[in-house]
Amino acid sequence: MAETSFNRLIHGENRLQICAILALISEVEFKVLKEKLAVSDSVLSKHIKALEDASYVNVAKRTDLGRKRTWLSLSREGRQAYAAHIQALQDIIGETHND
């Protein structure tokens, strides 16, 4: 098997979905992402923290109409890691179909 950039951190189901969503848009509010993934605040926070610690996700807290809101975006490193992971998955699939 060829050397791939399979990323175990990104590959987790919720983290993969987070990266996939963030790769399509510039940023999303925490609440919207939580609803899209149908997970609790604590579950999403845990996954966001792991991605943030790897410098894959940027977290911005803003006040809007007196309410504090958390906005998430995929960092440049996160976009690169996500793209490399998707390529690794495509390479894996290609290798199994070429046998």
Image (cartoon, rainbow, N blue to C red):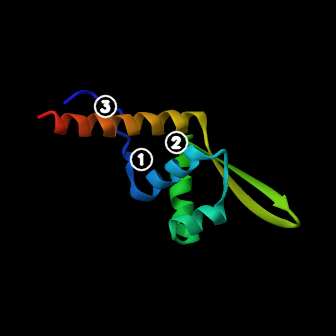
Using residue 25 as the reference point, say whether residue 60 is left or right of it: right
Residue type at tag 1: Leu
Q: Position of residue 90 (x, y in %)?
A: 32, 37
Q: Which disc, if any, is residue 59?
A: none
Image point (51%, 65%), residue name:
37
Question: Quick check: 13 above or below 43?
Answer: above
| Nearer to the camera, 2 or 93 | 93
Q: Position of residue 99 (x, y in %)?
A: 11, 35
Q: Position of residue 55 (x, y in %)?
A: 57, 40
Secondary structure of residue under mark 3: loop
Tell which circle, 3 or 1, labels the residue nearer the N-terminal end: 3
Secondary structure of residue under mark 1: helix
Q: Residues within 10 Å of mark 1 (few under 14, many from 20)?
A: some
Image point (52%, 53%), residue name:
18
Q: Are marks 2 and 1 in contact (CB under 8 Å)?
A: yes
Image point (19%, 30%), residue name:
1
Residue bearing mark 1: 9
Image point (57%, 62%), residue name:
45
Q: Which disc, if any, is residue 4?
A: 3
| Nearer to the camera, 58 or 87 | 87
Residue type at tag 3: Thr
